[in-house]
Amino acid sequence: MSAKIPHFETMEELELNYIKMFNAGERITINNCSFGYLSHRIVFYLLNLHIKSRHTYFARAGTSRDEDSYKTDAGLSEQGRLYAEKMGQVLLRHRDGERRALADQGGTDIPLKPLKVWTSTRRRTVETADWLYDQGYSVRQRTQLSALNPGVCERMSEERIRAEMPDEVAKHEADPYHHRYPRAEASANERLLISDFADSRTQSYHDLAVRLEPIILELERQQEDLLIIAHESVLRVLYGYLMACNATDIPSLSFPRNEIIEIIPASYNNEATSIPIPDLPAEIIPSSPEDLKIPVPPSEAPSGTATPMTLGSPRNGPGTPRIITTSPSNDTGALSEQGEGSSLLVERALRD
């Protein structure tokens, strides 16, 4: 320690509040544990961290028979089933290609880490994982991964929303992360359906982030590779956390269905990789129409990194995190340098 950091002095003042972590979680010292709620949350967060390598994958659920409805828990359409099978095949082929590439570069040809799959409890996400389940992979359903409730805007086009609710549009444009659309009225049967998979209240992205806190903590604990199949609103929040995005940018992230996003932990910031899914029908590729397509107000002082405005590849955008785009025929990928993000504490991600 003295050779690398000549002026390092350990903290020994007993009257101060501090937390020491030794060797990435081998030992943690908490001095004067009478400090408040936020400090206790930070300690809980640190107890869940580790530095073991693992890959996290994000994929959209396949198209359902009633794609535009939040209340209807419809199963996959025929195109959705085709997508689910192709998505699983591309992911497994990519993982095997990464293993072979590592062996070709002189690394040890070791077996892949086990892959776990998390889905929401909605039928279309569960059925999207069925192909992988049939291949023997572990699938777990998580109620917290349910989509954001759009309220009265369900089934409404952007033009209709702008025409009928100009005041709400103005509020959304001013603060897309915290804004909630008005709550929709629901019948008794609809409330019963909604209560099976999500909160019946209309929600903002901030509300969704708070709901996802247990998922984020368990995500940090994961030591095996993980595929999360969920609605685009959920993927936006999880991607925003892992890639240190500004909260105002999260609602504008885009996840088309013809790509799987792979996130790989690195020393100071994570790297995102796009894995294309070829030969999908053009009509199922576009990202969700749930949010208004609005310009995100620029941040005066970026909290980490500005996010990609369209995460199609993921690609251009001011200060976009480092991105690697791969194709099924080229597993090594091509690096596109687009800026760097800084680390983001869980409390900032959940309470910004």
Image: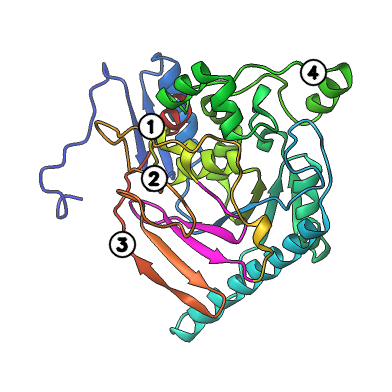
**Rendered location of residue 47, percent (x, y):** 49, 36
Q: From the viewer's perspective, is residue 161 above or below residue 115? A: above
Side (left or right) of 94 relative to 11:
right
Q: Which residue is mark 4?
A: 186
Identified by mark 1, the residue type is Thr
Identified by mark 2, the residue type is Thr
Tag shown at residue 307: 2
Please state which of the two labelled residues, at mark 1 or mark 3, is closer to the viewer.
3
Compute the Cα span from label 2 to label 1.
35 Å
Lower sequence index among marks 4 and 2 = 4
What range is drawn magenta here?
254-278
Q: Under tag 2, what secondary structure?
A: loop
Compute the Cα span from label 1 to label 4.
51 Å
Q: Under tag 1, what secondary structure?
A: strand
Compute the Cα span from label 4 to label 2.
35 Å
Q: Which residue is mark 1?
A: 29
Please state which of the two labelled residues, at mark 4 or mark 2, is closer to the viewer.
4
Compute the Cα span from label 1 to label 3.
38 Å
Lower sequence index among marks 3 and 2 = 2
Compute the Cα span from label 4 to label 3.
48 Å
Neighbour tally class for label 3: few under 14, some 14-19, many 20 plus, Cα within 10 Å: few
Q: Residue at x 49, y 78 (%)?
A: 102
Lower sequence index among marks 2 and 1 = 1
Q: Which sits in the foreground, 289 or 260?
A: 289
Residue 41 at least partly seen = yes
Identified by mark 3, the residue type is Glu
Q: Which residue is mark 3?
A: 337
Side (left or right) of 282 relative to 100:
right
